[in-house]
Amino acid sequence: MTNDKPLTSDHHISIAVGIILSIITCGLYNIYWNYRQFQAMNALLGREEYKFWPWLLLSIVTCGIYHIYYEYKMGSDLYTWLKEQGKDPNPNLPVIGLVLACLGLTVLSDAVYQNEFNKLA
């Protein structure tokens, strides 16, 4: 196992605040929240795999279908990274994100992933 805290406090976001602001701003804060999660995931992976602008553009063009894919991808990459670090993540993490995203509850899938990021910050 490497560093116990691989993310900085900059990667910590209050889940309750994220959900409330996403609802109050009709989803605009959720776009920013995804941007912040991409930064956290890139920091964990040590490379820029999650790119905000292509994700945003493709999510708009595909009416959200690309975002559903990205929710699954983030869950899968997060699960793999946690497993490689000797942690014991929920093996259903990618499926949870996928199902919630398919149901239109992407704010909740972001909350699930943020919970994992917060543990690492």
Image: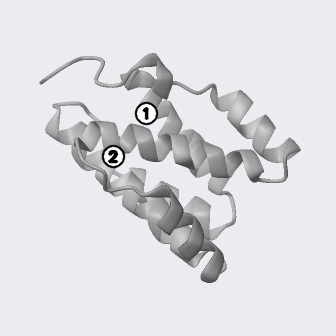
Between residues 76 and 46, which one lies in front from this camera angle?
Answer: 46
Give how far across and how far down residue 48 sits, in percent. 31, 51
Residue name at image x 82 percent, y 46 percent = 23
Give how far across and how far down residue 34 sits, in percent. 56, 49
- Furthest toward the bottom, the residue is 62
Residue 46 falls in image quadrant: top left
User: Is disc 2 surrounded by few (<14), some (14 to 19) or many (20+) residues within 10 Å?
Assistant: many
Residue labelled with disc 2: 78
Residue name at image x 41 percent, y 23 percent = 119
Give how far across and how far down residue 79 sits, in percent. 30, 47
Look at the image and tell me in which quarter the N terminus lies: top left
Look at the image and tell me in which quarter the C terminus lies: top left
Give how far across and how far down residue 44 sits, in percent. 28, 37
Q: Amino acid at mark 2?
A: Leu
Residue labelled with disc 1: 116
Q: Are marks 1 and 2 in contact (CB under 8 Å)?
A: yes
Task: Determine whether 120 is above or below 75 in the image.
Answer: above
Residue name at image x 69 percent, y 65 percent = 104
Describe the element under mark 2 as helix, strand or loop.
helix
Q: Is residue 30 left or right of residue 58?
A: right
